Image: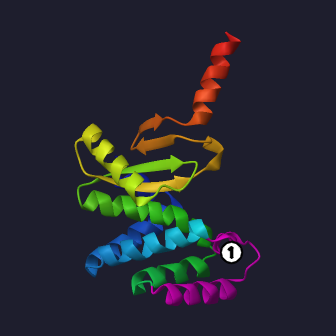
Amino acid sequence: MENSSGIRASLAGRYATALFALATENKAIDKVEASLASLGKAVNESDELKALISSPVLSRAAAGTAIAALAKKMKLDGLTTNTLGVLAANRRLDQIPALIRAFSTLAANHRGEVTAEVTSAHPLDAAQIDALKAQLKKRVGNDVSVSTLVDPSILGGLVVKIGSQMIDNSIKTRLNTLSQAMKG
C-alpha cells in the first residue's frame, strides 16, 4: 500500500493532500472523489481535454477560463473546481491525472482500502473492474480500490501495482521474456 508520505512527496501529491484535507474538513470526500472520477474519465476520453491540460502555450488566464467553464459544465463540486483553478493559475494542469490518482489513494486509505493501480491496453468496463476487485480482495484480504490507466504499448493483459508489489501479466512482458529465452 502506498503510504501518504510517498504521496506528499510529489507535486500532484501535495495538491491532492491539500484537497483531501479540505474535503475532510468539509465532509466532502465522496463528492470530491466523484468529481475527480468524472474529470479523470473525461481526460481519458477527450483528446481536446488532454491537449488543454498539457498545452505549454496556453496563458494562465485562458487556462483558468477554460477549466472553470469545464468544471461548470461537468457540475464538479466547489473544492475540486477551486483546486483546478489553482492548478491553472500555477500552470500545473498537467498534474491533473496524478492528482486524481493521489486523491483516490488518500481516500481509499481513509476508508481502510488498499489501492491497486491497474494498467491495461484497452479501457476496462465496470464488470471487468468488479471481477478484478474481487480477485484482488482474495489476494490481499482487504477491500481494493482500483485506479485504471490505459497504455496501448502493453499490447494486452494487465499490469497491477499494489504498493510496492507489481503483477505484470502484459503481453509485452511475455514477448520480452520469450525473446530473452530464445537468445539463450
Q: Which residue lies at the image location 59% right of the left edge and 31% below the top edge?
A: 173
Q: Quadrant of the C terminus?
A: top right
Q: Is residue 49 magenta?
A: yes
* Outermost residue, right side: 57
The residue range painted magenta reads 46-75
* Outermost residue, front side: 127
Q: Secondary structure at mark 1?
A: helix
Q: Label 1 belongs to which residue?
A: 48
Q: Quadrant of residue 29?
A: bottom left
Q: Is residue 181 magenta?
A: no
Query: Callout 1, which amino acid?
Result: Glu
Q: Quadrant of residue 93?
A: bottom right
- Horizontally, residue 156 falls left or right of residue 136, namely right
- Horizontally, residue 17 falls left or right of residue 172, namely left
Q: Quadrant of residue 175?
A: top right
Image spot of residue 85 (x, y percent): 54, 83
Mark 1 residue crowding within 10 angstroms, few (<14) / some (14–19) / many (20+)? few
Most common secondary structure along the magenta stretch: helix
* Outermost residue, top side: 184
Image spot of residue 45 (x, y percent): 59, 68
Residue 92 visible at all:
no
